[in-house]
Image (spheres, rainbow, N blue to C red):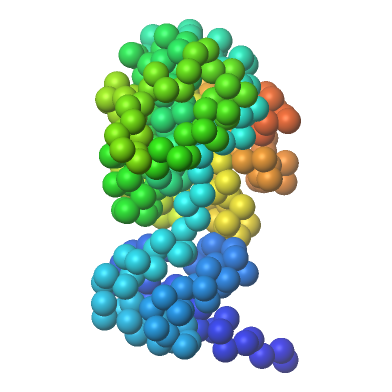
Amino acid sequence: MTTRPDADIELGLLLDAIFEKYHYDFRGYAEASLKRRVMSALPRFGCETISRLQERVLHEPNVFAALLGFMTVQVTDLFRDPSYFRAIREKVVPYLRTYPSLKLWVAGCATGEEAYSLAILLAEEGLLERTLIYATDIHPDSLRIAQDGVYPLDRFARFSENYLLAGGRGSLSYYYTARYASAVLDRALKAAILFSDHSLATDSAFAEVALVSCRNVLIYFERELQERAIGVLRDSLCRRGFLGLGTKETLRFSAHAGAFSDFVPEERIYQRTWEATWRTRSKQS
């Protein structure tokens, strides 16, 4: 019988402890990736082993709060992967125009850049005034940054390039005010977005929306958690609603694949089929 390495055993115990103490569930996350991130955190907390880190996490809540920054991936930009946003603008927006009011969901919003990107896009398409964007994440510090809508000014050269490649209709500078070394996003964008805590590992669908954008989140989950998460995303979509995933993510091998049809396959944008929507609504009733 093969014996698991001590670090793997310790990691499992750490994840169990975090769930029991703080109700954050990382047990279905991809183990190899999560292990690398936890190991990289050990020097930051002065720990030689994961077991020592577990002891500190259990007795020092501030250590867990800081550890979350290592355990969650918070890499994002305004209009990251511009071709995705161009596809939303050119292919999805014509459908969104038919709704008298709109609700969208950015799941795993990190520090908020994707939610603001959608808000800018919808503003340019004349839809923002009748839109509410839910933007959720499990990381409290990231949500605070997102709510503030203040980012380093030196990032905006790249953001502006992304914006134009995504089909931007003007200048990105219209949507922010420069203050010293920071850029403060426009108040009208913030007013359209509701940032809140939500975990795809433990929480359920909370609203019916026309579009869910959940990009580069599923790749950090093991298969069972991926299936759970896709089920939550599916249940949140209205009739003929749209689901956007990351470039390395797919529904092809999911048990939920039958609930969707390809809409813009090259950008991983799917549309929920009417039949699947009807069946789910019938079961719920």
Picture coordinates of residue 91 (x, y %)?
Answer: 62, 16
Single out the residue that lies furthest toward the front. Answer: 180
Query: Quadrant location of the N terminus?
Result: bottom right
Q: Is residue 62 above or below residue 166?
A: below
170 relative to 61 in the view: left or right: right
Residue 158, position as x, y percentages in the image: 55, 35
Please tell me which residue is depicted at 33% across the width and 82% down the height of the picture. Answer: 56
134, 25: nearer the viewer: 134
Q: Is residue 66 left or right of residue 13?
A: left
Task: Return the residue nearer the eye: 95 or 126.
Answer: 126
Q: Residue at x 36, y 26 (%)?
A: 176
Quarter of the image that includes the C terminus: top left
Q: How many marks?
A: 0
**In the displayed structure, would residue 11 be above or below residue 163?**
below
Q: Nearer the viewer, residue 5 or 206?
A: 5
Q: Quadrant of residue 112?
A: top left
253 w.r.t. 174: above or below:
below
Mark yes or no: residue 213 visible.
no
Q: Report the residue at 33% width, 77% height from top.
A: 57
Which image quadrant is residue 153 in? top left
Residue at the image point whose x is 29% and y is 34% from the top? 179
Residue 127 lies, in percent from the top left, at: 41, 12
Q: Would residue 162 be visible to someone looking at this image?
A: yes
**Residue 153 in the figure: left or right of residue 273:** left
